[in-house]
Amino acid sequence: MLIFTGKVFSYLLLSVCFVGFSEHFIIPATAQIQSDSRVITTITGKDLVHPTLSPNGKFLAYAEVLVQKSVENTAVRILNLDTKKSILLIDDKTAAKYKTYKSFVSDMEWSRADRLSITISDGDVDSTTLTFNPGTQKLIGTKFLEPGSSMVQQEKLLGQIRSVFPKVNAEALQNGIYRYQVLANGVVLIPGKLFDQEDNLWAFDISNKSVKKLLVNQDPLVKSLLSKDHPLKVVYSSAQRTILIVYAHASYERGNNPLYILEDGQLRLSNAYQQLYDVSVNFKGDRIAYCYWKNGKRQIIVKTLK
C-alpha cells in the first residue's frame, strides 16, 4: 500500500513554479547514478535506524534498536558531524516508559535547528511525540497522539482541496487522501488519478490555488513508484533535484528500498547501496545519510552530496 504520511517533512522545499494548472510532465529514465562522494562518518556496531540530518547538516539524529529480555526497546543519539562526539538524548529507560508491548521510534524530524521531534510508538495503537532542544538536551514538549487523529487531518485537507480545486476527481481524491505528504512550504503531494486516467504524483499549492504533475505514468519505473503496494516518500526537493525513496519492504524486513533522483527532467535509480533501508538529506542538499543493511544489522554512513 502506498501510504504518504501526513507528518510535515521540515526543510523539504518543492521549489517549482506553479502557474495555474500545468500540463508539464517529466519523462523518467532508468539509468543508474552515483549521488555522493566524500565520506563524512560511518556509524556501526548496533542496529541503527531513522537517520535524520539537521537542517544545516552538522548534526545527525538516529535511533538504536534494542532487544531487552526479548522485548524491543530503543534509544536516540545525536552525533556532531564536525567533532564526531555523540550525546544520548533518550535512553532505554526513558523510552521504555512509553511502551505497551514494545517501544520504538516511528518518526523523527527537525522542524528547525533547535527543535527535534521524536515519535515513539508503544507497539500497539498509541504514540507519543517528544520535542527537544538538541543543544540543551531539554525536553520542551510532549504530545500524545490519539488513534484516529490523522483521519481528522485528512478530512480537513480533503475539504480544502475540494474547495480550491473543484475539477479534482472527488472519488479518486477520497481514495488517495490517506497517502498524502505535506512539505514544509505547505505543498501537498498526493498520488492517484486525480485529474485524468493515469496515475500521477500531484503537487497541490493550496495557498496559490495551483497544481502540478510531478510524475507521469508512462514508464514501468514510474508505475512502480506510484504503485499502491509500497509507501513512497519525498526526502528532498529543490528546483534542481528531487529525491524519493520507495519503502518496498516492511520496517523489520531486510531488503532494498530503492532510491530515485529526479534531475534535469530525468528520473534515475541510485545505485548507492544494494540493500538500502532509509535515507535523509539536509536542507541545503549537500549531505546525505544512508542507512543500509550489512551483516544482519543496519548501519549509517553520511556523505557529501554532489
Image: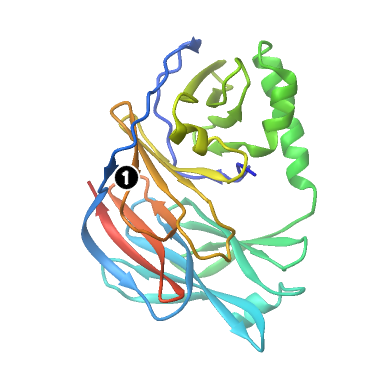
Q: Is residue 128 above or below residue 294?
A: above
Which residue occupies the extreme bottom position in the image? 69
Q: Secondary structure at mark 1?
A: loop
Residue 174 picture location, percent across and down? 74, 28
Q: Is residue 48 visible to the viewer in this orientation of the structure? A: yes
Going 48% across and 61% down the picture, which residue do you hit? 255
Q: Is residue 139 above or below residue 16?
A: below
46 or 255: nearer the eye? 255
Labels in figure, total: 1
Question: Callout 1, which amino acid?
Answer: Gly
How packed is label 1: few (under 14 Cα within 10 Å), some, or many (20 or more)? many
Residue 31 picture location, percent across and down? 29, 38
Going 27% across and 58% down the picture, which residue do you hit? 303
Residue 251 picture location, percent across and down? 58, 61
Going 49% across and 19% down the picture, which residue do you hit? 212
Q: Quadrant of residue 249?
A: bottom right
203 or 224: nearer the eye? 224
Asked whether, in this view, residue 211 is left or right of residue 194, the answer is left
Circle 1 is placed at which residue position?
Answer: 285
Asked whether, in this view, residue 199 is left or right of residue 167, the answer is left
Q: Is residue 128 above or below residue 218?
A: below
For the N terminus, the image quarter is top right
Q: Is residue 91 visible to the viewer in this orientation of the structure? A: no
Q: Is residue 293 above or below residue 199?
A: below
Going 66% across and 72% down the picture, which residue do you hit? 103
Q: Quadrant of residue 161?
A: top right
